[in-house]
Amino acid sequence: MPPALPKFCFSPAIFSFITFSSNHNQQSFIISMEDQDQDQNTNLDNEPTSVSSHGHKLYQQIDTFISILHDQPDSSSPPEIVEPVQNFADLFDAMLAAFESGSKRCTVFKTDEPLCFLESVDRTAKLIKSLRRFDSDQIYAVAINRLSGIQQRAMSIMEDEFKSILDDYQTSYDRDQKAKTDETKTVHLSSSSSNVEDSSELELPDQDQAEPQLEKDEFLGYSDALISDLNKLVNGLIQGGHETECSELYFLVRRNAMEQNLKAIEFEKFSIDEMQKMQWDLIEKEISSWIIIFKRFCNSLLPSEKRLADDVFWGHTAISNRLFSNLTRNILLCFLNFAEAVMMTKRSAEKLFKFLDIYETLRDNIPTVEKLIISGEWLPQLKSSAVLIRYMLGESIFMIFIELENSIKSDTSKTPVPSGAVHPLTRYTMNYLNYACEYSDTLEQIFRDHQEIGADFDDLKSQDHQHNYESNEAGSGSESGSGSPFQAQLTKIMDQLDTNLEAKSRLYKDPALSLIFMMNNGRYILQKTKGTGEMRTLLGDPWVRKRSSDLQNYHTCYKRETWTNVLQCLSHEGLSANGKVKKPVLKERFKSFNAMFDEIHKTQTAWVVSDEQLQSELRVSISAIVIPAYRSFMGRFSQVFTPGRQTEKYIKYQPEDVETCIEELFDGNAAQQGKKR
């Protein structure tokens, strides 16, 4: 048995006794208190009494004693310890013994016990604190020793209860969902069993209001009542000197919960070595998942976790901030390690867009985390790590564009594209830039941050300055974004592509086909630029107008190169002398026209103009100069020939046949002889 506490009796005296009885391993406590005041005795006899009311009176008596100790001067002798302290210690000791033995279910929040568990913990802590002012007194030292032992046992029970509730987060979440489902079913059953008038008055749950609550508690699963209980336990544990144990319990349980939540949404950790060995297509899938999960982590899980820590440790802000900071650190470093591992893979053009996605994800979501983490020694480390990863990603992105420019410059293939079609280099470059310009704001930011990255970019700046000067002089510079580093790099890549295409056009032996090649590629570039608002904005309207003008020049040169000699055959000059037609010369003219037109038709039906609008423009412009000239020539000289075999020999095409043949040009098919009339 623990040593009895010394007794001190107020006047009027307070008599208390505690009787312990055992029946089938169940302990019950009977408390009886009598006052000398006859009126109070009469009231107690006439009113039904409850054990909890006696416990409440016991708390009041202890509070009175604590107040006396508080007002007692330090230099004076300590007052005698009152008997209610002994009674309280015995009663609380018995309650703990019942919990520890398992004879009573431990429910620290029940209020129908002789004593309220949490209030008893609170009084014990206050008693110990007050008694310690006089711990040099042997009697006080004995009392402190016993109460401290009781307090330690109570703390152990509270820790178990605290951990039990924390561990129950998933179960409680499922239970809440089941309760909501059952409630909804009950409402629907009630509605279906009632008449129309009754059902019209029935208020169904508001689904629009229920959905946000599910989102709010998506990662937590604690009801408001459980959070309130957790806060009460936290207050008791901290007041009882178990702040460290309480914090460690909370940290371990919530860390495991966060890891389980991330695992449930398929977040996987990869080391740098593992990432280096993975194929890029697999890494791309992991990056897509990482982006979704990281955004969810920053915007849903973390705010929920922050709210939980603040609510559970309400009244202890420093502790909640520290715990949340430490919880966030471990998970966040895993996310940053993934981004770093991706960044350290071998740089290539195909990785640009995933690098940009990671860059934007870090840029847009890390500030949210920084706002939530109010304190933490590692916060500067987090900021510096995130900034460093973003900077290195930006450097890789910047260098990818430099390498793209160099790869265009070094593409010196000597094999011309068949039929003058759009070159694969043109398609790749324009589609690549077209997609890249969707990230124009981010790329502008990256290029501004990396203007001093190296000699390549220093050279870019000087050339860009010269380019802008020349462009302004020529009236072809960009109206918007002039001088911005990404716009300068984009313009430089486009100029390099032009230079490369001009070199490739010289691989064709036929000058007309060379011009068709330039038209095909020029139109493709122009259409891609016009189709992307961001790219057109960066390059500017003057650049677009100049490209349109270049395209028209190619068109004009093609007509001159291909059809000038054909039209000379249809010239009236030199066919008449002294009012008579020179029949031999006329025959040669028709023969030359037929031969030239046959050759053009045979050759250029195999050429390709893939853009339907350009193809139509070419055919229309050719018809506009050839068909009127041929009709005029036919109308003037066809009657010179003798009808019959002579006419068929020299007049091979009717105007309608010429028009049909022109409509067959640039289809990329084998030549088809036009129908003869």
Image (tube, rainbow, N blue to C red):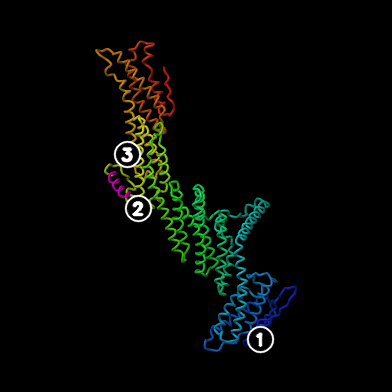
Mark number, residue 546: 3
Residue at 62% across, 59% down: 176
Q: Nearer the viewer, residue 409 or 324?
A: 409
Tell me which label, 2 or 1, sits earlier in the chain: 1
**Numbered range of the magenta stretch:** 459-471
Tell me the quarter of the image containing the N terminus: bottom right
Q: CA distance from mark 2 to mark 3?
A: 32 Å
Tell me which label, 3 or 1, sits earlier in the chain: 1
Does residue 526 appear in this view?
A: no
Judging from the image, what secondary structure is the residue with disc 2 in?
loop
Q: Position of residue 184 (x, y in %)?
A: 63, 54
On screen, residue 259 above or below 619: below
Quadrant housing residue 383: bottom left
Q: Could you tell me the amino acid type at mark 2? A: Gly
Mark number, residue 449: none
Q: Position of residue 465 (x, y in %)?
A: 29, 48
Whether the magenta-drawn stretch holds residue 671 is answered as no
Q: Please give the residue where the numbered disc 1 appears in the rendered image.
A: 36
On screen, residue 134 above or below 448: below
Q: Please give the residue where the numbered disc 2 appears in the rendered image.
A: 454
Q: Could you tell me the amino acid type at mark 3? A: Lys
